[in-house]
Each structure stands twice: as C-alpha cells, then as structure tokens.
Image: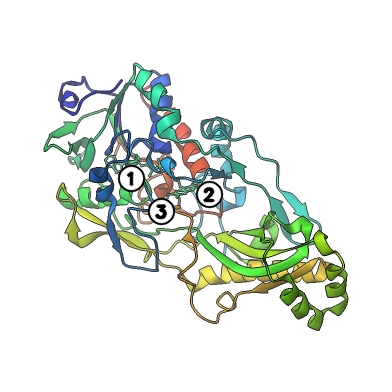
Amino acid sequence: MLIPFDAIAELSTPDVCVIGTGPAGVTLALDLADHGRRVLLCEGGGFDFDERAQEIYRGELLGDPYRDLDIVRLRAFGGASGLWGGVTRPLDADDFADKPHHPLARWPIVKADLDPYLASALVMLEVDPLPADEPVADSGFQRIHFGESPPTRFGETYRAAVLDHPNIFLCLNANATEVRADDARATGIALADFDGGRATAVAGAYVIACGGIENSRLLLWSNETSNGRVVRRADALGRYWMEHPHFTVGDFVADRAFAHVHYSLTPDRRRALGLLNCGLRFFHRADWPRDDLLDDLAVAAPETAARLRARGDGLSAGRLRAAWEQEPRAESRVLLSTGAVDRFGAPRAALKWLKSPEDLVTVRRTASAFGDFMARAGVGRLRLRDWVLGEGDFPEDDELGGNHHMGGTRMAEDPALGVVDANLRVHGQPNLYVLGSSVFPSGGHANPTLTIVQLAHRLADHLAERRG
Ligand SMILES: Cc1cc2nc3c(=O)[nH]c(=O)nc-3n(C[C@H](O)[C@H](O)[C@H](O)COP(=O)(O)OP(=O)(O)OC[C@H]3O[C@@H](n4cnc5c(N)ncnc54)[C@H](O)[C@@H]3O)c2cc1C
C-alpha cells in the first residue's frame, strides 16, 4: 500500500526497509513480502519523472569522458528501468572464477549460486530462456545470445503488485539522506521529502538499492556523518568502479551469416590468452563502403576478395562494435563532490571513471583474434580502427559505455577488498545490506540487470531465512 511521508514515524517496525525501487528494490520487496516479511519501501522520486528528484542525480565527472550523471539514470519509481534497453544475458561461469592474470576480477560466489534464480529473474524481466552458446569450430570463439526484454518498465509493470501487497508499505518522495549506526549495528535511515519533512525509518534490517553510483554516494556520506560507523572498513568503498566500454572498433566485410551475430572468445581460449571478457557485435549497414574494404582485401588476399565480391547480396558489410569487461582498479571510483551539495545538504556524486591500458589490450587482442579467424577461414575481412591498434586515444564521440554502473560497494571475502560479503551484508554490520550492480566485483561483458535481479531473489531468500 502507499503511505504518506508522515506515516513512516507511526509504522510499527517493519522487518526490512528497502531504499530504492529500481529492478533491485522492487524484486526484493515483492519476494520478501511473499515470504511474509513486512517491507517499508522508500523511493526518492515519485511515480512520474519530477525535476526536483532528477536534479539530485546531477554530479561531477572527474575521469574519462562520460555522459552527464543525471542522463544515465532515472530517479523515480521503477528506477533506470524507465530508460533501459532490455538487452539481457547472464554472466558466464568464468566471470565469477579466479583468473591468474586478473586476481581482483573474481567473485566470492560462483555461477551455481545464482543459477537457481535465473528462471524467476527471466520471468521478472519478461525474457524467454536463452539458447546455449555455440562454439565456432577451430576459431576459439563462440556464438553468444542475448535476451530481449520488452523492455520491462518496473514502474509500470509492477506498480499494482507493489501497491496491492498487504506486506509492502511504499513511500514516495522519501529520500534517504544518511544511514545511521551505533557501535553494534545500523539503527535507522534518515529520510527527507521535498516539503521540508524529515523522518527516520527504523527496521530489523536495511537494504540500500539506490543504483550503481548512488549506493556508493549514500554510504560514503553516511560514513562521514557517522565518523566511520556505517562501513567500518572503508578501503574499497566507492572504488573499483566499472562500466562496459561500448565502442565501434572496426569495419567488416564478410559472408551474410556474420551480420547481427554476437561472439566472444570461448572461456578456455580467453583464459589461455589471459584476457578479460569481451563481446563482439557485427552490425550490418546497407550503406557501408564494402568495395573499399574488398579493395583492401584484394591486396593481401586476391582470391578471397574475388570470391566474396562474387557473392553480391550474400555479402554483408558494416561495423564491428564491442562491449567489454574492465579490469577492476581502485583508482576508478565514485567520490563525494568537494564543491556541490544537493538540496538536502549531501555532497553530490563525483565520478572518476578510468579506462586502463589493460582495457585496450582486452578489446584489441579479442578483435584481432577474430580478424585472424576470418582471414584463416576465408570468410571475410576485419579492419580495426587506428585507436584500437594503439594510435590515438579512445574516441569521445562514441557510445562510451552501456549505462552499466558496476562496483563501488564490491563483494569480497576480505573487507580490505570489498564492502559487502557473499550475502551482500556490509562487513561488520549485522543488519545492513547493499543490492545492485555496485556489488559486482567484476563485470564480464553481459548487461547487468539480469544478474541484479538474480541477486535480489537470492538476497530475499537470505533475509527470509535469517529470521527463521
Ligand atoms: C539508457 C539506459 C539503457 C540501459 N540499457 C540496459 C540494457 O539494455 N540492459 C541492461 O541489463 N541494463 C541496461 N541499463 C541499466 C539498467 O537500467 C540498470 O542496470 C538497472 O536499472 C539497475 O537497477 P537498480 O534497481 O540496481 O538501480 P536503479 O534502476 O538505478 O534504481 C535505483 C532506485 O533508487 C532510487 N534512489 C536513488 N537514491 C535514492 C535515495 N537516496 N533515497 C531513495 N531512493 C533513492 C532511484 O530513484 C531508483 O528508483 C540501461 C540504463 C540506461 C540508463
């Protein structure tokens, strides 16, 4: 049911207070409520876009070029699912595993820990089960598949379910401004509305599900105002922030079978090459200068060029786009702005997103390996852009990233390397949890929302079991 802001103080103590109503918060609240838990669900925005809420998302960019922080997310009921494209894919088993070349890119859980929640996450996102990856003989690559959500807008699709559930108390325009803690546990969440109202949510457990930048901001600020009581070991807080770089990396001409097909290295090949995960996406463009590419090819491989040219309409030409995994780096981080504050007096987010030379190696070597395979198999030609080959910087006029905000409150067994444990509980806090892609210790190349929803289902089971 919907409750007004001033009813929070009178609510008899809920089992769980969830902050945020994106895919993470809504999935968790519905599951917990179905488990019989009473949930106070607080959303900083309203049902519809409201500039007063959205402007709180303004922030500073201190690192590599990126889009403005109030463009890449939505502060309203349903969160950024009001903007998302609906492309889904689970992480690969190898994304979770130890990697000799990238020791930080590992999870304290394995894929099998999330697999039981895949079917229900696909249902939440209205996505059909995905076909299995298909290795391409002798290439070291596999054809991979993505699911397509309608895309599900959580604010519309699940609004009635949230409002009608007797165990959910939804409060809109309820902005969490601080998490409070004493020396033993989290004690409450300070809330503010847009009319000067202030309240404190008190519950048995608290879950911060404010999105992949805001989770860090809220905890960083809470740590300042509580003298470090909220995240007691804060070495990793805000750090190891990652995106999936999204760039056009080359142009191709190839058999039509390649158009609109996605590939990645097989896990074995990736491991042998010591690379992180990278998805290659071939986009056919009817207007692409395929004759230029064939002329180039004719210099090196005249027979292949002639054979391809003879295919006429059976030939595809276009762009190769890539979306890939970054190495987790402490320097890439969410910080508190040292200048600007929001209307509630909290420092705005400052994002220092950094790509590294290693990130360039991942895409260059993966794309080059695919080009080598095309040449070997005589199926086409791939010409990589100069910057991919190391001549010049990443272009600034491309997509840059996928709006996938990962890290900042990463999951790790060691509190020196992570903020939450394998159950998403903040290290050293018995009753404070973080949910969303901010907990990803590494990001693979798959779009994150399916994994976020899997984690939400898993956290609901954990919290439901915890009380017995
Ligand atoms: C343009 C665009 C396209 C995308 N396309 C895809 C895609 O194709 N596939 C994919 O997997 N992902 C995609 N994403 C990412 C996807 O939207 C996110 O992964 C997903 O929404 C994250 O869910 P979440 O619940 O963790 O966070 P969010 O959706 O960000 O929700 C956070 C919620 O917390 C609320 N909130 C924040 N701070 C506070 C506070 N202090 N107090 C109270 N409430 C607060 C917000 O209002 C919001 O409701 C896209 C994103 C964008 C912007």
**Could you tell me which secondary element the residue under label 3 belongs to?**
loop
**Could you tell me which secondary element the residue under label 2 belongs to?**
loop
Residue at image point 37% right, 49% down: 73
The spot of residue 424 in percent (x, y) is 39, 41
The spot of residue 27 in percent (x, y) is 43, 31
Q: Quadrant of residue 386?
A: bottom right
Circle 2 residue = 447
Relative horizontal placement of residue 257, taking residue 282 as reference (left or right): right
The spot of residue 450 in percent (x, y) is 52, 41
Query: Counting residues from the N terminus, which is met first, the one under dot 3 or under dot 1?
Result: 3
Q: CA distance from mark 1 to mark 2?
A: 27 Å
Circles 3, 2 touching at the beta carbon (< 8 Å):
no
Circle 3 residue = 407
Query: Counting residues from the N terminus, which is met first, the one under dot 1 or under dot 2?
Result: 1
Look at label 3 and name its amino acid. Answer: Gly
Name, please, the residue furthest toward the top.
Answer: 166
- Residue density around tag 3, few if under 14, some if 14–19, many if 20 or more, within 10 Å: many
**Which quadrant does ligand 1 occupy?**
top left
Residue at image point 39% right, 60% down: 67
In this view of the protein, which residue sits in the foreground, 238 or 315? 315
Residue at image point 45% right, 68% down: 355
Mark 2 CB within 8 Å of ligand 1:
yes
Look at label 2 and name its amino acid. Answer: Asn
Eye-nearest disc, 3 or 2: 2
- Residue density around tag 1, few if under 14, some if 14–19, many if 20 or more, within 10 Å: many
Q: Is residue 357 visible?
A: yes
Circle 1 residue = 427
Residue 34, above or below 59: above
